[in-house]
């Protein structure tokens, strides 16, 4: 691994991964290839902008010519694909873009990886491909049971990656991560919505009964797991990546309010997300066998995240004040309040 193409590197997890890789290694070049959609933010990459081992290319992973040019120009030997439309609620409003980027864009990258016979293509996937898991834990060989347009698109991409491994011997690996939280997460996902709303004394919109369970992991733990798989993972293999511990959304809301010293009356129940998956739960023994372990538990991950949003109002305030965000917020939440 010498010249790494990080697609979607201006987003939440991708930018944290870029920071971590450039801090960890001084013998690799990192090329971020990102379309800069509403979720891609050059501010996320400010900490590395003067690093001589970092380069930025603005481009769409669905654009084969642009991908090819970046592969050639930077002599890419490894691709890590974070680029995707990622928000489940937006996939319920406008699924087309999810199929385009998450499925077709992955295909374009796989073709480029095949053409240039690169050392490794790594796909960032999600625990959502297993669907709702009411009891037990998902293992990597479980059947996929997707229920939202987002998870269906991600599953399509996973299957295409595995097809390129089987059909063309492409050295593909996949990680299926649980919910990430931490710095630079766009304030549409639950934790940054709750934290930034609470700071402003605004309601925390809680879907349904708030008893849905997610495995909230700290983003840098996830990034360390990806690096572990790049170095020690076997081609053709899938690795689940999470803490293996779930919490309910109501617990999450209580913890955030406690950390910020805000009243519980800020919790506002609203109508549920259609097709809302009740629980995700991963068995992570396969990646732990490679030597990886998460270093933040739920409370530590939420505390570090809350602190970052308190300290970095410059980052999220301009997003939340923008017209795009305010229109999204109205479309997403207006009129959904329910009286408990
Ligand atoms: P994000 O929405 O914060 O960022 C996505 C990035 O991809 C943005 O920078 C955006 O500009 C870029 N992008 C979108 N379409 C593109 C295109 N056509 N071409 C090039 N760039 C494009 O996403 P995230 O939360 O950082 O998620 C990153 C990856 O991790 C995704 O593949 C997601 O499915 C997966 N994942 C996310 C989580 C989570 O909790 N956030 C958990 C597991 C897996
Ligand atoms: O599990 C991994 C997935 O986690 C990733 O693949 C996705 O890209 C990422 O968006 C995330 O999906 P979720 O749907 O789990 O995340 P979200 O933050 O949207 O919601 C988390 C939980 O909180 C879920 O049960 C719905 C609930 N929720 C969400 C929002 C935005 C609320 O109660 N209120 C909200 O306003």
Image (tube, rainbow, N blue to C red):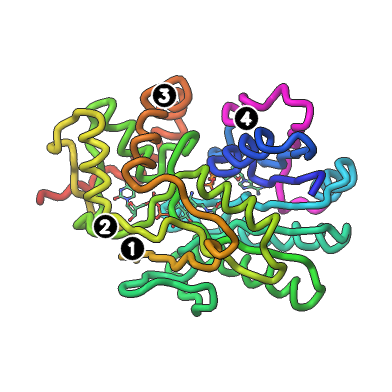
* Distance from the alpha carbon under mark 4 to that under mark 2: 35 Å
Q: Residues within 10 Å of mark 3 (few under 14, many from 20)?
A: few
Local secondary structure at mark 4 = helix
The image's mark for residue 272 is 2
Say which label, 4 or 2, has the lower sequence index: 4
The image's mark for residue 45 is 4
Mark 1 Cβ inside 8 Å of ligand 2: yes
Query: In the visual, does 334 lie left or right of 60?
Result: left
Q: Is residue 217 above or below residue 323?
A: below
Can the viewer see residue 256 in this picture? yes
Query: In the visual, does 120 lie left or right of 162?
Result: right
- Whether the residues at callouts 1 and 2 have beta carbons within 8 Å, the answer is yes
Say which label, 3 or 2, has the lower sequence index: 2
Q: Is residue 14 above or below residue 154?
A: above
Q: Which stretch did the figure color magenta?
A: 42-64
> Which residue has dot 3 on it?
317
Of circles 4 and 2, which is in front? 4
């Amino acid at each position: 691994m010498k010249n790494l193409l990080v697609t979607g590197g201006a987003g939440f997890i991708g930018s944290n991964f870029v920071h971590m890789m450039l801090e960890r290694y001084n013998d690799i070049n990192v090329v971020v290839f990102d379309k800069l959609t509403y979720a891609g933010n050059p501010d996320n990459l400010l900490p590395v902008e003067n690093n001589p081992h970092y380069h930025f290319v603005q481009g769409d992973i669905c654009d084969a010519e642009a991908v090819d040019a970046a592969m050639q120009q930077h002599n890419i030997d490894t691709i890590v694909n974070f680029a995707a439309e990622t928000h489940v609620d937006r996939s319920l409003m406008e699924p087309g873009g999810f199929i385009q980027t998450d499925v077709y864009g992955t295909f374009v990258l796989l073709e480029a990886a095949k053409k240039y016979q690169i050392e490794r293509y790594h796909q960032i996937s999600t625990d959502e491909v297993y669907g709702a898991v009411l009891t037990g834990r998902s293992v990597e060989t479980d059947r996929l049971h997707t229920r939202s347009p987002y998870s269906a698109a991600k599953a399509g991409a996973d299957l295409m990656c595995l097809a390129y491994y089987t059909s063309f011997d492409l050295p593909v690996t996949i990680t299926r991560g649980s919910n990430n939280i931490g710095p630079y997460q766009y304030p549409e996902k639950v934790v940054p919505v709750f934290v930034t709303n609470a700071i402003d004394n605004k309601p925390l919109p809680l879907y349904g009964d708030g008893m849905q369970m997610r495995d909230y992991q700290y983003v840098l733990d996830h990034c360390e797991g990806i690096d572990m798989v790049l170095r020690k993972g076997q081609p053709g293999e899938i690795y689940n990546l999470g803490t293996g511990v779930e919490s309910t959304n109501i617990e999450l809301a209580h913890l955030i309010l406690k950390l910020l010293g805000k009243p519980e009356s800020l919790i506002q129940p609203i109508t549920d997300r259609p097709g809302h998956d009740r629980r995700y739960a991963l068995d992570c023994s396969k990646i732990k066998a490679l030597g990886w372990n998460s270093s933040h538990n739920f409370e530590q991950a939420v505390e570090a995240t809350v602190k970052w949003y308190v300290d970095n109002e410059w980052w999220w305030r301009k997003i939340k004040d923008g017209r795009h965000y305010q229109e999204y917020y109205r479309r997403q939440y207006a009129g959904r309040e329910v009286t408990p």
